[in-house]
Every structure is written in C-alpha cells, then in structure tokens.
Image (cartoon, rainbow, N blue to C red):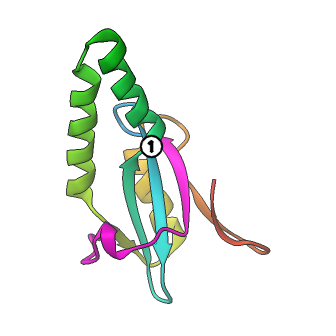
Amino acid sequence: MRSKKEMADLDWQTSSVMRWSSGEEVEAYLDWDERRYYLWFEPTSGFEDWCEEVLQKEHDDSMVKILAELREELAQIGVQEFCDLDGVNEFCKWYCGDDEPAYFYEDDLTGICGA
C-alpha cells in the first residue's frame, strides 16, 4: 500500500540492491517504526555514474534518458508501507528483473538486515 510518508521523511535503516524489471540497478531502502515497514527504491550511485560515463565517453545520451525514465517510475511508486517483511520481499520480487530480488530478513543478533 502506498504510504502517506515521503522519502524525505524517512531515514533508511538497511538496504538491498537488485536489478529492476528492465535491468537497471536499484537500491531498495527500508525504514520502520513500531507498526510498519517503509520501502522505496532509488537508482544506485553506481548505475547513475555509469549512465553519466556513457554520456561523457561515448556522447550517447540514451542511458541518461533511461535513468530519467527510471527515476520517474520510482517516484510514481513512491514509498510503500507494509505490516511484515514477507510483504516487503514479495513487493521487491514483483519488480525484480532477474532471479535475485532485494531481500530483507530479521537476524537474531543484528536485527533487520538487507541481503
């Protein structure tokens, strides 16, 4: 469910990287409080740097355009709100572009972690 909270209102506590449905690399960020988990996606800094590098070295703006489209798509998804980590992981699986979606779990020693 889309949250009323905005990304700027949250401080991520853990994250996990995955391929987006079109192959772009994104970071899934997770924050939580005593009642809910809050998930949002952003392009990784590595993917952003690579898109800029393609533009600079090859004078090809196609990747910068893909990055802009990805940012727009991620902004439309916004922050999603969940009651449990299973819901978070299913949501990540839905948008994953390969067999390794972002994944979050609770560790007995360290608490909630991203894989």
Q: Is 65 placed above or below 61 here?
A: below
> Residue 107 sits in which quadrant?
bottom right
Is disc 1 placed on a helix, strand or loop? loop
Q: To which residue does mark 1 refer?
A: 44
Look at the image and give the residue range highlighted in magenta: 1-18
Q: Position of residue 75 (x, y in %)?
A: 23, 55
Residue at the extreme bottom of the image, as rendered:
34
Quarter of the image with the N terminus in it: bottom left
Q: Residue furthest top?
A: 58
Asked if one can make out residue 102 in the rendered structure from this viewpoint, the answer is no
Residue lying at 32% horizontally and 10% vertically, measured from the top left: 58
Q: Is residue 6 within the magenta segment? A: yes
Where residue 55 appears, as percent x and y from the top left, is 30, 19
| Residue situated in front as seen by the camera: 42 or 83 | 42
**Type of residue at label 1?**
Thr
Report the front residue among 61 and 97. 61
Please tell me whether residue 89 is drawn above or below residue 23 in the rendered image.
below
In the visual, does 33 lie left or right of 65?
A: right
- Residue 34, given in percent of the width and then of the height, sits at 50, 89
Residue at the location (64% across, 64% down)? 113
Q: Is residue 35 above or below residue 109?
A: below
- At 32% from the left and 70% from the top, the residue drawn is 8
